[in-house]
């Protein structure tokens, strides 16, 4: 019995020390992965070896706003976790904004999104052009959507559909809809849904609408 107790305590201590020693590396990996995804939304390809350098080169400013479009001081936009914010009342949520300069010199606003797919969380970033309506690029990802179906949200053919789509129509926020059966030709507010991935498509469409509408006042006040 004494031997068993000693072994259990020893293993517990060893596991705790290992977790403690690995924590900084894990946090760094999360940071780098987030920077890679943010850069991807403005078509900047990066990897773990150059993500930090490219992020510092392209992301010129970041800040947090509230749903009224006003800046919130004292909050680091990069550290905001949308999943936690969504549990708060709407008026208390912190909404991150990242200002980027693309390779062609255009200034873009990058807005993060988080929602629910079929099997778990989905998330992404939407980059808006200077008019704060036209989409310059997007990137989406997921935790466990079905390969070949819902997981297609993280592929270039799907993501590229969003380029030059518009989230406003005649000054009114309309978002971009993910349409089952296919978008209407030439419609600036629709993209094709994923064949066989209806629930994930619906979740993505809801994530885009529910995430971006929180920024509506900020976007309307700053549109050019």
Image (cartoon, helix red, strand yellow):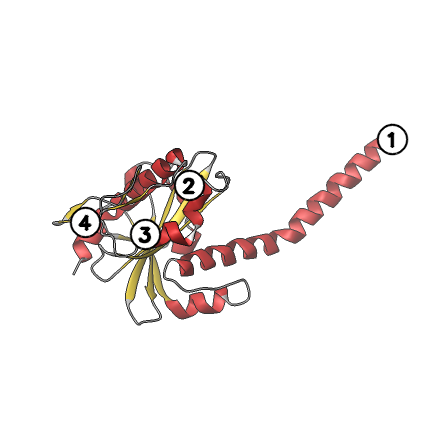
Residue on which the image places disc 3: 161
Residue 86 is situated, as x and y percent measured from the top left of the image, at 37, 39
Give the spatial CA distance, label 1 vs label 2.
45 Å
Crowd rating for badge 3 (residues with CA inside 10 Å; few <14, some 14–19, many 20+): some
In terms of sequence position, does the residue under pointer 3 or pointer 1 come before the other? Answer: 1
Q: Which residue is mark 1?
A: 2
Residue 32's place in the image compared with 60, above or below, is above
Q: Kindly report which numbered mark, 3 or 1, lies closer to the viewer in this rendering.
A: 3
In the picture of the structure, the residue carrying the numbered disc 2 is 83
Q: Which dot marks residue 168?
A: 4
User: Regarding mark 3 in the picture, which secondary structure is present there?
Assistant: helix
Q: Are marks 2 and 3 in contact (CB under 8 Å)?
A: no
SS of the residue under disc 2: helix
- Secondary structure type for disc 4: strand
Compare marks 2 and 3 and give the one earlier in the sequence: 2
The span from disc 2 to disc 4 (Cα, nearest Å) is 26 Å
Between disc 1 and disc 4, the foreground one is 4
| Front of the two marks 2 and 3 | 3
- Residue 200, percent from left and from top: 40, 37
């Amino acid at each position: 019995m004494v031997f068993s107790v000693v072994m259990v305590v020893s293993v517990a201590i060893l596991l705790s020390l290992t977790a403690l020693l690995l924590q900084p590396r894990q946090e760094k990996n999360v940071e780098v992965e987030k920077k890679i995804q943010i850069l991807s939304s403005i078509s900047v390809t990066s990897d773990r070896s150059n993500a930090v350098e490219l992020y510092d080169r392209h992301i010129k400013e970041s800040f947090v706003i509230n749903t009224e479009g006003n800046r919130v001081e004292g909050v680091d936009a990069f550290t905001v976790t949308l999943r936690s914010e969504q549990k708060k009342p709407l008026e208390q949520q912190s909404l991150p904004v990242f200002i980027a300069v693309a390779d062609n010199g255009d200034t873009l606003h990058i807005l993060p999104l988080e929602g629910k797919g079929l099997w778990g969380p989905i998330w992404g970033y939407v980059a808006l052009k200077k008019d704060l309506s036209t989409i310059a690029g997007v990137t989406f990802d997921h935790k466990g959507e079905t390969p070949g179906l819902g997981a297609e949200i993280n592929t270039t053919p799907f993501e590229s559909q969003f380029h030059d789509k518009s989230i406003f129509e005649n000054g009114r926020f309309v978002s971009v809809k993910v349409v089952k059966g296919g978008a209407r030709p030439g419609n600036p507010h629709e993209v094709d849904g994923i064949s066989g991935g209806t629930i994930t498509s619906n979740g993505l469409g809801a994530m885009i609408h529910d995430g971006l509408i929180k920024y509506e006042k900020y976007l309307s006040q700053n549109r050019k």
